[in-house]
Amino acid sequence: MMNEYKSLSVQYLTGTVQISKPVAPNLVAFDSPALEVMTDLRQIQAAVITPSTTMEVANTYMMQRGVRTLLVMNDDNSLAGIITATDILSEKPMRFIQERGVKHSEILVMDMMTPLDKLEAIPLEEVSHARVGNIVASLRESGRLHALVIDENTIGLPRICGIFSWTQIEKQLGTVIPPNNVAKS
């Protein structure tokens, strides 16, 4: 089997050699197409977790993946809600511990997540001709750091096809966007 492959030629390194760096995320302006700052779940595997996972495991998983949002999926692969780093790092878990008398290690994703019926999503149709500034304005108005994008023109059930993240948009704009200071809890 291996005989059909011949080894490749090599060369000795001399002089000055540099190392490739990943390309910085496309820099954008407020006027750039919104799609340029959307995490497209049709191309990038979504970071998902189950409702019955502990919050601590969810937090570790976020850090490993380098994300601040996890989509919470039911056993039938339908969306149950989302959990964000803010949910985990806010005072929400402490309040839950006091109300329920549970240990920190016993808090589950389902206890801290924003459930499906409290989630809003922007139709992909809207996003396709929106600008980055429209997304920032929408996030600001909702008081959230993330927005989901829904594609209703799919065969079968509507699908979440993208996520907008305030931190990702700031990275790509190369600037800090002053928040509105009106956070919805």
Image (spheres, grey):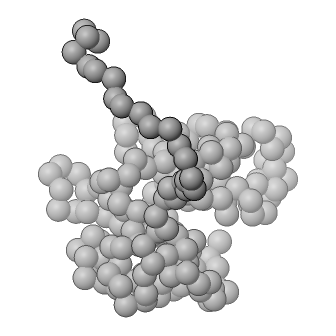
Q: How many marks?
A: 0
Q: Quadrant of residue 39?
A: bottom left
Is 23 situated above or below 18? below
The residue drawn where x is 32% and y is 81% is 33
The residue drawn where x is 14% and y is 51% is 155
Q: Where's residue 101, x and y in %?
A: 84, 45
Front residue (pair 129, 95): 129
Is 115 situated above or below 173? above
Q: Going by the image, does 4 lie left or right of 90? A: left
Q: Where's residue 5, x and y in %?
A: 26, 19
Q: Where's residue 38, x and y in %?
A: 39, 68
The residue drawn where x is 34% and y is 29% is 8
Q: Going by the image, does 27 lie left or right of 7? A: right
Question: Could you tell me which quadrant the N terminus lies in?
Answer: top left
Is 66 situated above or below 172? above
Front residue (pair 1, 111): 1
Q: Is residue 108 visible?
A: no
Q: Going by the image, does 145 lie left or right of 60? A: left
Q: Is residue 168 visible?
A: yes
Question: Could you tell me which quadrant the C terminus lies in?
Answer: bottom right
The residue drawn where x is 79% and y is 47% is 100
Is 138 situated above or below 47? below
